[in-house]
C-alpha cells in the first residue's frame, strides 16, 4: 500500500447487491437480502437497507446480525424500519432523502426516493441510496445520481427494471472513477463478457466486478 495514498475502506462483495465495508476495525453491511449469503449480516456494526424487496431486505439475516452484536444498529427507510423497530427498540433508524448520519464510524448521506420503474402497471415503492464517506455510492434499485462526486459507484448491472443502455448512461452521468457490479445474481456467466465489454468501453469509467467473497481497497 502506498503510504501517500492509503486505503480508506475495504470493500467485500457478497452475492447480488450485498456489500461489506470495513474501516478501523468496524464493519458496515448494505442490503443483506435473500439472494445474499445466510451470514451476510453477521459481524456487522451497522446495517443499511435501501428498500423492502426480498433480494435486498431479509428480516432473518438482519435479525441475526442484530442479535449477534447487541451494539449493532440499522438505518433504512420507513417500510423496512416498521418491520423491525418494535423488536429492537432504539436500534432501527428511519432515514430519507437528504438525511446525513454516522453509522459505526462511517459518514453516510441518503440520496433518492423511489424505486426504478419495473412496469407502468406496477406501483413504485420507495428506495434510497447511500453515499458512504463521500466516496462510495450504493443506489439500491434506482439510477439515482447524487449531487456529490462519487469515486466508486456500485452499479446495478442486471435487473427486471433496467437495460444495458441505461446502465451505461448511468455511469456516464455519475462520472465515478470506477464502477463495480452489483445486482448481478441474474446475470449468467455466458453474458458477463458482453456486459464487461460494453460497460467498460462505453461508460467512461474503470469498470470491474468482484466474485462474491473477494475484497478490494478503496
Image (spheres, rainbow, N blue to C red):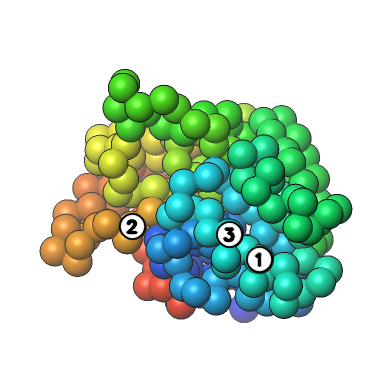
- Residue 63 is marked as 1
Residue 218 visible, this orientation: no
Q: Residue at x 67, y 59 (%)?
A: 47
The image shows residue 128, relative to residue 124, as above or below, that is below
Q: Residue at x 54, y 36 (%)?
A: 127
- How many angstroms separate mark 3 from mark 1 (CA)? 6 Å
Say which of marks 1 and 2 sits in front. Answer: 1
The image shows residue 61, relative to residue 201, as above or below, that is below
Mark 3 touching mark 1, by CB under 8 A? yes
| Circle 2: element type | loop
Tell me residue 89's x, y (percent).
Answer: 83, 54
- How many angstroms separate mark 1 from mark 2 (CA)? 25 Å
Q: Which residue is mark 3?
A: 59
Say which of marks 3 and 2 sits in front. Answer: 3
Q: Indicate left or right for 71 with 179 as reference.
A: right
Q: Which residue is mark 2?
A: 184
- Residue 76 is marked as none
Amino acid at each position: 500500500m502506498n503510504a501517500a495514498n492509503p486505503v480508506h475502506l475495504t470493500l467485500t462483495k457478497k452475492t447480488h447487491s450485498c456489500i461489506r465495508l470495513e474501516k478501523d476495525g468496524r464493519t458496515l453491511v448494505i442490503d443483506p437480502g435473500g439472494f445474499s449469503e445466510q451470514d451476510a449480516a453477521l459481524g456487522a456494526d451497522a446495517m443499511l437497507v435501501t428498500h423492502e424487496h426480498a433480494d435486498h431486505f431479509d428480516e432473518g439475516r438482519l435479525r441475526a446480525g442484530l442479535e449477534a452484536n447487541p451494539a449493532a444498529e440499522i438505518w433504512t427507510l420507513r417500510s423496512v424500519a416498521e418491520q423491525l423497530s418494535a423488536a429492537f427498540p432504539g436500534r432501527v433508524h428511519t432515514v430519507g432523502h437528504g438525511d446525513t448520519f454516522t453509522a459505526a464510524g462511517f459518514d453516510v448521506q441518503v440520496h433518492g426516493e423511489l424505486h426504478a420503474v419495473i412496469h407502468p402497471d406496477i406501483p413504485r415503492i420507495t428506495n434510497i441510496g447511500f453515499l458512504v464517506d463521500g466516496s462510495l455510492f450504493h443506489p439500491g434499485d434506482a439510477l439515482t445520481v447524487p449531487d456529490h462526486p462519487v469515486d466508486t459507484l456500485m452499479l446495478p448491472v442486471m435487473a427486471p427494471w433496467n437495460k444495458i443502455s441505461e446502465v451505461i448512461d448511468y455511469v456516464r452521468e455519475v462520472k465515478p472513477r470506477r464502477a463495480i457490479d452489483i445486482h448481478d445474481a441474474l446475470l449468467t456467466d455466458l453474458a458477463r463478457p458482453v456486459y464487461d465489454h460494453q460497460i467498460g468501453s462505453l461508460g467512461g469509467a474503470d469498470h470491474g466486478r468482484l466474485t462474491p467473497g473477494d475484497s478490494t481497497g478503496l
